[in-house]
Amino acid sequence: MESYYISRSSPSDDQLQASETELGELDVDIDSLRADLASLPTPPLTGWFLLSNVKQNAVDIVRHGWAFEEFERVFVTRGPNWARYGALNRSWGYNLHAWRFMQPLLKEHSASGTSDWLAAALSPALDWIDTYITARPPEDPMAWYDMSLAMRTPMLLNLLIRVARNDAHSECLPVLTRAMILHLDVLNSEESFNVNSNHGFYVAIAQVHVSRLVPFFPGARTAGEAGLIRLRRIVDKQFSVDGIHLEHSPDYHRMLLGSFEAAIDDGLVDDPEILRRISRAANALGWMIKPDGHLVQFGDSPSTRMTIRGAHSSDPNTQFIISSGQSGQPTSEQSVTYPAGGYFFVRSPPPQVAGDVPKSSYLAFSAAFHSRTHKHADDLNLVWSDLGCEILVDSGRFGYGQLLPADSPLRKSGFYYSSRERQYVESTVAHNTLSIDNLDQQRWRRKPFGSGIVDTKEHLGVFEAIGRVVYGDYVHRRRVVFRPGKQLVLRDAVYSKKSGPRIGRLWFNISDSFCVVEEASSLVFVNSAFPRPIRLDVSGPGDLISPVRGQQEPMRGWRSRTDRCLEPIWSFGFEFMFTTRRSVETTFTLSLV
């Protein structure tokens, strides 16, 4: 690798002196530590810390800069302004400070065996350390952000072991050792560990990772013991007893489950209760996959494709779904209820052979509020696919972006991000559920209720589910009656706790594969993308709120399958008046034209 692409590959005199002084005060024998580290095999570059594949190769990163989504490239090996990127976009800053660029550089070092590629990896590491492990680091909320810290730790450890085995860069060892000791100290702090967020898992498993790979490293054993205790707390807080991730998002369920499974495969987790809970979560993931192979977009979920070549699950039923029936075992179950997690799923008929998955009718019903993490204003929301196409769809995630000011009044409505597109996908109108008095369902002032599933049943091919949610001044109860391939009926009952007239609005979002063909005496959609067009007749209570598609003011009729991208869909509703109580019915009927 040409040297002019790399700003540095050795520590500054000040860096080296400060590191050696501190290690001396900690009584760390650097020569003994070097010998112990050098005796280890090179750690793997994949595992629990690789949440998605890094598609960029090392040559491209060094020559043209590290690429993240649609943002400008960052020349990480040439001394970038590290603090700039997180200030512009939190996701950009997090991925940069997690050293997402490091894996391809170290992978190239493994493949080539040359010191040049180790120098390329050392350049951003030393520059980052010189920037943030100093008396006056820049203000940067993403540098020691819990996820950045957790994901950076295995990359730093991998680099440390490589340097110990390479005499050409031995002077870097004290600087990297000092940085690793500080990383363990910060990981051990209570400020870095949030048991109520999936982030807590990554902090805890990073501690265990270091202790298993280098148990002799200063502070590693203590960190590992604390990490194991934290993991037990995390699995109890993050997954319900029936295996549902408690952050209202199938994609975060997928992500955390995959990390747990990778940690189990890496030999880092062997606690029996954790293994049981993760086994249930692996089975639940299969039910979250729609007939088109994508995850249901409840909560903060992009449209993640699950049926990809090489996809693997530890659960045989889920493996059957994600492999499109090529491996694993089919289930005979047509529906499943998660009374603790707050979900109900139907897949009918259950696929039995390769090619069957896209043919099933599918319904997903959500009645859950376990915390405010990733929670949209979407109680009693549902998603429906049938006859080979999506029908009722969810708004998705859109991405995070910049935070609202702490004193913003929108915070009291449950919003945390400033983007109007983000606020839209969180709002009630962007989901298939009920709003009262034109307000979003309350999240901020309401105590999480857990699961709102009341009852579910199946009889002669008809599936029913009941969910009930209590708000500050009203109660909403929804009965779902589903006849696969034929009809979906929603019976919504609302009870007001205050006097006076109130307005109920039922909102629905229809896939853009349909077109509106009639909205006078009845509302009719047709999907003509199939050999035989599919007709959807809709009848509901009160007054029809006319369908719109991709409306800007006010925003209505959008979905986000990938972050920061909106696509138009059909949005419509029914408005009705009530005082104390009102029960209404909405019917969706399918037929082939």
Image (cartoon, rainbow, N blue to C red):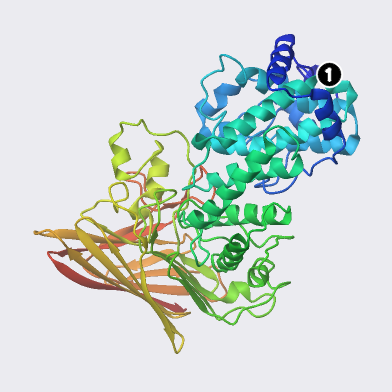
Q: Is residue 356 above or below residue 400?
A: below
Count of residue discs: 1
Where, by quadrant of the figure, is residue 38 drawn?
top right
Q: Which residue is mark 1?
A: 3
Where, by quadrant of the figure, is residue 207 drawn?
top right
Q: Is residue 442 left or right of residue 206?
A: left
Q: Of 342 and 394, which appears nearest the observer?
A: 342
The outermost residue toward the front is: 27
Q: Is residue 84 left or right of residue 578?
A: right
Residue 464 can be seen in this image? no
Q: Where is residue 549? Give x, y as percent.
A: 39, 54
Q: Where is residue 461? Give x, y as percent.
A: 46, 86
Q: Where is residue 137? Give x, y as percent.
A: 56, 17
Which residue shows up at 70% across the image and 40% down it?
Answer: 210
* Badge 1 amino acid: Ser
Which residue shows up at 33% across the image and 62% down it?
Answer: 433
The outermost residue toward the top is: 13
Residue 152 can be seen in this image? yes
